[in-house]
Amino acid sequence: AIPTAAACKSAKVVVDRLLERQRQENDGQWPESIALVLWGTDNIKTYGESLAQVMEIVGVRPKPDALGRVNKVELIPLEELGRPRIDVVVNCSGVFRDLFINQMNLLDRAVKLAAEADEPVEMNFVRKHAIEQAEEMGVSVRQAATRIFSNSSGSYSSNVNLAVENSSWNDEAQLQDMYLSRKSFAFNSDAPGAGMEESKAIFESSLKTVDATFQNLDSSEISLTDVSHYFDSDPTKLVQGLRKDGKKPSSYIADTTTANAQVRSLGETMRLDSRTKLLNPKWYEGMLNSGYEGVREIQKRLTNTMGWSATSGTVDNWVYEEANDTFINDPEMCQRLMDTNPNSFRKLVATFLEANGRGYWDTSEENLDRLRQLYTDVEDKIEGVE
């Protein structure tokens, strides 16, 4: 029975604010396509709010039956919608795919319904892109309108997070290739029971027209750098590399943790997140009260911050600079971290050096020399060398 009527109402508020924000920043132009993420547990908690957002963006509405079950959709007439139908590229998490296969069916039918509507292409970007892709790839418009993607059956995540956490990636192109190869399995409502089909060509082709990337935050307990899943599903730099004009798409985060939902840019959300968590004395002192595990939490948050630099490039230089001043340049804090958890402190130091080496943090040679010396010192401490 999701999305519920209440979820659809909340979704409309967020979508209206998202589109208005995008238009303000792009000379009044409507975005032609938006790439977004659907999470399993988030849609359970919100009764399908982000699911309803996809429908609202495309300009379709769910049609519940007499028992409130949603298994049909209908187009919202353009006169009522008051704007063009906007194309989507939907990345469903592995858990969403497992839990909500019926809703994936609903979304695929919704997008294909829009693509086959007899409407002018300047008012229906789903149809516009599907026609272009059909001609380019030699397939039907319906097949070209494939927009609901996830991992292959039984597979989860793009593994970009694992590569970042283990520093086992050569360059951003490698991360983007991982995302493309693992997230390019499409759901097809015309082949029920067939599972996820690899559709890398259509996935890449769809991402080339994306003007904005979008995710939801619906919990005040889990923010962008608390877990690695958020940046693991972020395609911002990937889209930039695929677009013919090389333009970086706008990136937005909807904060639906309160009744008054806010749509912020990814950069604004990262700054807010850094100020309230990583660089907030109340937060890191609270972590350090936990001892060994607290140091690991601080290190993990810095690693996740660097993950956002790798996938989106929206982390300001001052975030790394102030984190370095807080945890490294303060001798007392530095010693506390080293004594409490030398292994995590070594990873923290290595992450600062890696952020600089990969071009995400520009700092003084003095800071880098201190970090290199600290790395040697903590190695000696771990190895028991006096």
Image: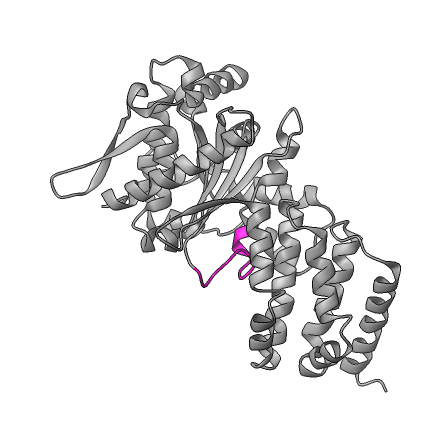
**Quarter of the image with the C terminus in it:** bottom right
Q: Nearer the viewer, residue 348 or 102?
A: 348
Up the image or down, 35 lies above or below 137; here it is: below
The secondary structure making up most of the magenta span is loop
What's the magenta region? 220-230
Q: For this view, does 313 lie left or right of residue 28?
A: right
Residue 218 screen position, x and y as percent: 41, 54
Percent across and percent down for residue 367 are 83, 64
Q: In which quarter of the image is residue 67?
A: top left
Q: Which of 238 and 374 is in front in this view?
A: 374
Relative to residue 211, is residue 280 depicted above or below? Answer: below
**In the depicted view, which residue is nearer to us: 50 or 129?**
50
Q: Residue at (60%, 59%) from the top-left corner?
A: 274
Q: Position of residue 322 (x, y in %)?
A: 71, 62
Q: In which quarter of the image is residue 368?
A: bottom right
Name the residue: 74% across, 59% down. Answer: 321
Q: Which residue occupies 78% across, 70% down?
A: 329
Residue 148: horizontal and vertical position, in percent?
Answer: 42, 36
